[in-house]
Amino acid sequence: MNKALRLPFIISICLVFLDQASKLWIKSNLALGESIVLTEWFQLHFTENPGMAFGIEWGGIIGKYILSSFRVIAILGILWYMFRLAKGGARQFVLISFGVVLAGALGNVLDSLFYGLIFDKGLVYNEHYNQWVMYSGVAEFNTIGYAPMLLGNVVDMLYFPLWKGVLPSWIPIWGGEYFVFFRPIFNVADSCVTIGVILLYLSSRKAENWGNSK
């Protein structure tokens, strides 16, 4: 392995461990929809996401298979490009940025790959009602599972309701409605992808950081 990749991979592994540890604890200790209120503006609120980041859903079972497969392909692509950049002499900042994105992608794909196999409960898609069906109680580890590989759901829990209230009536579209900011619930992996992309944008402003890789 290229020495330049050691630190990025170590950081990536640590972030994946943090992501998975938080998800496994939440799913095995809280019921779906249950919250732990830490402050007025920060809660651990357990929800499951069958789709993309921040609770976005798409395409039912077929969409779930496509999304999970795409995540696996994206991880392989990121790894390939990181080795290429390292060989081309890219700076550590760039490689670490990619490592953070890699951690985010890997963290969520592990949920899709394995959570349906190792837990007895999770969201399942009901084709009759054309929606994902919730479950009650706290999920437990088992060897039967609730869904095949690639159909496990991503665990989300980080919720920051920084502001709640009724918007002034003069605001277009949402004026007079009750509004929560920030409404999406996410996880450590989602944060890694967002932070990694921001770091890559900052590094792209200095092209020399990317070395001679073409």
Image: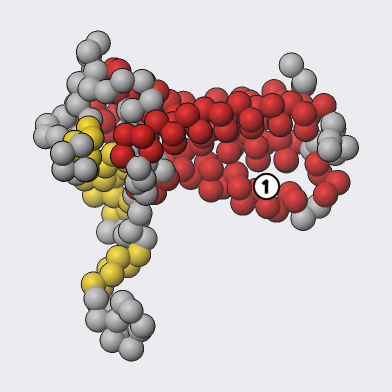
Q: Quadrant for the N terminus, please.
A: top right
Residue plotted at (78% across, 32% down): 85
Q: Quadrant for the C terminus, please.
A: top right
Residue 183 is drawn in which quadrant? bottom left
The residue wearing badge 1 is 200
Residue plotted at (22% across, 43% down): 131
Label 1: few (<14), some (14–19) or many (≥20) C-alpha neighbours in 10 Å = some
**How far across and down, in percent of the image, does residue 42 sit?**
32, 53
Left or right relative to 101: residue 162: left
Q: Amino acid at mark 1?
A: Leu
Residue 114 drawn above or below residue 100: above
**How far across and down, in percent of the image, does residue 77 sit?**
64, 30
For the residue pair 98 and 53, the one nearer the viewer reads as 53
Left or right relative to 10: residue 44: left
Residue plotted at (36% across, 83% down): 172
For the residue pair 130 and 186, the one nearer the viewer reads as 130
